[in-house]
Image (spheres, rainbow, N blue to C red):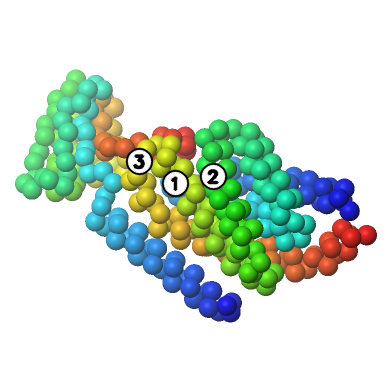
């Protein structure tokens, strides 16, 4: 076969792969289950895809209250009483690599993995 | 001349190892394991086309074994080996259909097979078929990386093949 034919075949395959990947990531997010931990203890587990009505969860710790806002597919820290408010500035929870953490009140919000991810196995 | 071939292969193995270690120390571009250029593969292809299949096989196995020791990741040894063996098998099976001018096509096919082998190994090791989710990304990255490494090997071979075959036959 001619070189040009191969180039066309491979470019098409590339585009197809990217399309399939976009389709996958739009419709099957790997994990939508979020865990809220305080002091290392699981306080609540929420499946973000099944949330219909926005809901506010208030957790209180030594340094005051944290208000977590849950809506369909989204979770974020709405307000906090701690001085630096890093958890509020973090915004919405997007990836399992960067959980929302409030150090003063020892609150962690992160995605719960159903399956071990590639990171856990390869150590990367 | 067998001795010359062995020496050539060992020099190429050393080069492959250096490029492998350098590439391993570059932080990964994406969190997906397996998306990388695979510069060391240039040397496997180069050896296959200039010296011969048995020598290329020796280079591949040595590079994977010593490279895993250097980078210190035992798990990645299994992935590399599975991917490497699968793609090498395809390489020697299909080599006759691809002259030097189309070396890069063979390289693309091998790179995709390599990623597929790695993915299947990962699925076997972790027992999570959901990893198939990464197949499109790995296939696309295989096509791009394979075209790059294949072209590198092809362009170098175009300039060096005459000298090398002259050296090996004297």
- Rendering coords of residue A20 (x, y %): 34, 62
- Rendering coords of residue B168 (x, y %): 87, 58
Helix, strand or loop status at disc 3: loop
Q: Which chain is indicated by disc 3? A: B
Residue assigned mark 3: B128
Q: Is residue A35 above or below residue B97?
A: above
Q: Residues within 10 Å of mark 3 (few under 14, many from 20)?
A: some
Residue B151 in sight: no
Quarter that holds the C terminus of chain B: bottom right
Residue located at (35% from left, 40% from top): B128
In the image, which disc is placed on residue B82? 2
Residue located at (66% from left, 43% from top): B61
Residue assigned mark 1: B120
Contact flag, marks 3 and 1 (Cβ < 8 Å): no
Mark earlier in primary sequence (2, 3): 2
- Rendering coords of residue B163 (x, y %): 85, 64
Residue located at (84% from left, 47% from top): B7
Drawn side of residue B150 relative to residue B55, left or right: left
> Label 1 to label 2, Cα distance in Å?
9 Å
């Amino acid at each position: 076969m001619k070189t040009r034919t191969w180039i066309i075949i491979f470019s098409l395959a590339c585009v197809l792969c990217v399309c399939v990947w976009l389709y996958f990531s739009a419709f099957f997010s790997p994990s939508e289950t979020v865990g809220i931990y305080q002091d290392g203890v699981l306080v609540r587990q929420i499946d973000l895809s099944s949330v219909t009505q926005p809901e506010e969860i208030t957790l209180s710790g030594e340094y005051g209250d944290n208000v977590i806002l849950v809506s369909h597919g989204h979770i974020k820290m709405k307000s906090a009483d701690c001085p630096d408010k890093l958890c509020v500035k973090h915004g919405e929870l997007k990836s399992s690599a960067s959980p929302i953490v409030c150090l003063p009140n020892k609150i962690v919000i992160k995605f719960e993995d159903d399956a071990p991810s590639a990171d856990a196995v390869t150590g990367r | 001349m067998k001795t010359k071939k062995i020496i050539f292969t060992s020099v190429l193995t050393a080069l492959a190892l250096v490029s492998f270690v350098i590439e391993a120390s570059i932080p990964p571009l994406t969190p997906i394991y397996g998306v990388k250029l695979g510069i060391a593969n240039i040397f496997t292809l180069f050896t296959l086309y200039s010296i011969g299949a048995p020598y290329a096989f020796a280079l591949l196995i040595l590079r994977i074994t010593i490279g895993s020791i250097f980078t210190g990741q035992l798990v990645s040894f299994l992935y590399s080996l599975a991917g490497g063996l699968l793609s090498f098998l395809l390489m020697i099976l299909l080599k006759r259909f691809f002259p030097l001018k189309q070396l890069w096509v063979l390289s693309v096919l091998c790179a995709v097979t390599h990623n597929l082998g790695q993915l299947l190994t990962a699925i076997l090791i972790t027992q999570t078929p959901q990893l198939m989710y990464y197949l499109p990304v790995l296939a696309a990255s295989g096509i791009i990386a394979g075209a790059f490494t294949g072209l590198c090997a092809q362009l170098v071979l175009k300039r060096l093949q005459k000298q090398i075959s002259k050296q090996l036959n004297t």
